[in-house]
Image (spheres, rainbow, N blue to C red):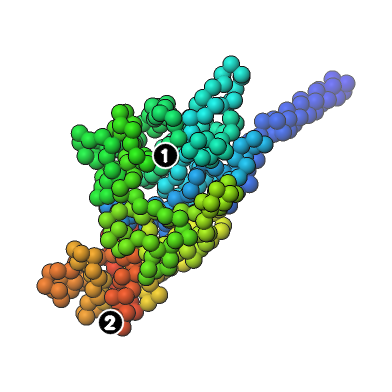
Amino acid sequence: MFRNASHTKRRYLQIAVVIVTAVTALVFFRSPPKPPESSVDRLQRSWESRALGLERKLQNDTPLKDATFVHTHNSYNSSKYRTAFSYLDPNQSETIKDQLRMGVRAIELDVHWYFSMEGWPWNWGKRPLLCHGQSNHLGCSSYDRHLSKGVDEVNSWIRANRHEVIIVYIETHLDGRYNDALNVFKSRVGDLVYTPNMARPGTTCEDVPMNVTKQQILNAGKNIILWSSGCPGGEWGRWVFRKNNNVPESNVERFSNYGACGNFDRNTYNTKMVRYYEDRTNLSNWFGDGSGKVNAQTMAEMMKCGVNLPGADKLTATDGRVKAAVWSWHQNEPNDWGGNEDCAHQWGNGRWNDNNCNVSYRYACKDGSGNWYVTNASGPWQNGFHYCSSETGGRYAYAVPVNGYENQLLIEAKRSKGVNDAWLKYSDRGREGSWTP
């Protein structure tokens, strides 16, 4: 009886040790809780993000002069990097990486050759710093971030998104130390850079190529276009495009709504990459270089005009300008309602919807000069290939708008005929969700 009681106690003790060990393991070795979802995380799961992604893919075979790259001005000058000694007057509200996650596809990095106090005193010295300052470096801080930290953010994002093409505009204040800055790019993203020699073999200091497509860049295994003002020649000119001649730009206060579309004529829009930017910092206001604001309506109007580089300061995931950059699909479309909506058409409001391909609409057609025509005939989606050609003697072809300006031209072509709906040469009949022209 004594032995049985002792045995029972030992069994209880063993069970207790197992329970305590298990509880201890749960307390000390469990996975840490997931961080709360950010507004950028939520945006990435949203309709806006999906619609912008479809627009970018639609533009893969579009020349750069007709493509859209939402951009941020002074992308590096963000409140997320602010310290007691640097970035006290920010242009942006999110990190460079989060700007890219929000749909920004062109970023601006101002690089100054300036004294850095990063690290131990014996490591101090002049470095390429990301600085919001004048050409004489007035406004820079010795505590500003090294160029490499901004490029590392670009590198981290683009290697996880190799189907995308991004532009990095480098504003240079390097006191001749161009190679010091260039080596930062070459060491981190050099294998991903589409160089001037690829656009036109044997060239250096090449202008930004207007007729190259994103797909050509991707086919070359590249994802990044570098450009800057001017060209010092040498190694820089073999890696960085010159933007001066092909990227006209203006403060957004000079922009006006669709119709006038600001201070650039239509020929400029048709042949170059037009950029509008805002600058809301106090520093720029003090020196007389401030601007008006890009709100959601301004962003939408820039889409209608075909602005290639619509810029924004203090862009956030919830401020409405991201949604306003969507010029194509209607809210929450395409949705494959009923499981049989595989063809796109433009509604009377200019927005797109997916519908059953056998519904009867007229057809959207475009000629080689960019003019739009809506057929007299109507029918199921697939008949557009025939009617666009037969009604125009082969001058027009079945088409889909590839930017906000073309979308507006199609609206006007429908209006001239009193038509509400028109089929677009755009479907996911091959594979659900994979929309192709």
Q: Residue at x 50, y 35 (%)?
A: 136
Residue 168 x, y percent position in the rendering: 40, 42
Location of residue 139 by image quarter: top right
Please say whether residue 427 is visible from this viewpoint: no
How crowded is the residue under tag 1: few (<14 C-alpha within 10 Å), some, or many (20+)? some
Pointer 2: what residue?
Answer: 417
Location of residue 28 by image quarter: top right
Q: Residue furthest left?
A: 393
* Disc 2 from disc 1: Cα separation: 47 Å
Q: From what the image shows, is residue 404 above or below residue 191?
A: below
Q: Residue furthest bottom?
A: 418
Pointer 1: what residue?
Answer: 170
Q: From what the image shows, is residue 84 above or below residue 284?
A: above
**Residue type highlighted by circle 2:** Lys
Badge 1 element: strand
Compare residues 154 and 123 and report the one nearer the observer: 123
Residue 397 shown left or right of residue 274 in the figure:
left
Residue 249 shown left or right of residue 7 in the figure:
left
Compare residues 331 and 303 and report the one nearer the observer: 303
Work out whether mark 2 precedes mark 1 in sequence or the reverse, and give the earlier one.
1
Location of the N terminus by quadrant is: top right
Q: Residue at x 37, y 40 (%)?
A: 228
Q: Residue at x 84, y 22 (%)?
A: 6
- Whether label 2 touches label 1, CB < 8 Å: no
Q: From what the image shows, is residue 65 above or below residue 32?
A: below
Residue 406 x, y percent position in the rendering: 31, 65
Judge depth for marks 2 and 1 and give the one in front. Answer: 1
Location of the C terminus by quadrant is: bottom left
Please say whether residue 82 is visible from this viewpoint: yes
Compare residues 269 and 148 and report the one nearer the observer: 269
